[in-house]
Image (spheres, grey):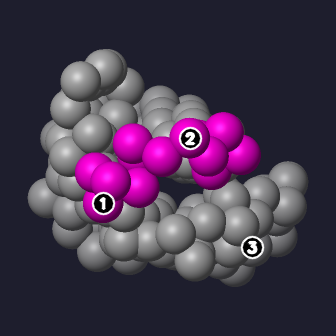
Amino acid sequence: MKASLSRLEQHFPLTAQTLKSEDEALFEKLDAFRVRFAGLQDCIGNKLFRNLLRMEDEEGLNMADTLSRMEKRHILSSADSWRKMREIRNVLSQDYPEAESQRADALNIAWAVAPELIKITDQIEAYLLKLYNLKLGGDD
């Protein structure tokens, strides 16, 4: 995700006109960003949070409970910010073939919150390292 952000930095904020261009390389980078954002958000919410609770012999009964527990561990700044990231992820998965302005808006919002998503992975890693001397794998 970090590499995707650095490759796209010069293109943000996006406009509908940008998305109407014929720049195939840009479209590939934007698609990679969209997929990475959605994948990271899914992985954190569906895997990391739940597995962390299992490691600590806790079970999240539902996502609200899981998010509350992540807030208590100072992994999330707020459950509401996580829910907003989930909404952004859902919007990015929708296809608006004729609406470049909607796609540009969704990508701009995702771009703005992507550092927070990366920060969450850093906070999970710091938590695991401090309590269990474990480090998350991967560079991106």
The residues tagged by marks 1 and 3 sit, at their Cα atoms, a distance apart of 41 Å
> The C terminus lies in which quarter of the figure?
bottom right
Task: Tell me which residue sits at (19%, 42%) in the image.
Answer: 102
Left-right relation of 128 to 99: right
Q: Amino acid at mark 3?
A: Leu
The residues tagged by marks 3 and 2 sit, at their Cα atoms, a distance apart of 45 Å
Please name whichever residue, 78 or 18, is drawn nearer the observer in this view of the structure: 18
Task: Tell me which residue sits at (41%, 55%) in the image.
Answer: 18
| Mark linked to residue 129 | 3
Left-right relation of 20 to 137: left
> Does the segment drawn in magenta span residue 21?
yes
Residue picked out by circle 2: 22
Q: Using the rendered view, name the quadrant where residue 63 is placed.
A: top left
Q: Amino acid at mark 1?
A: Thr
> Does the segment drawn in magenta span residue 19?
yes
Mark 3 / mark 2, whichever is N-terminal: 2
Residue picked out by circle 1: 15
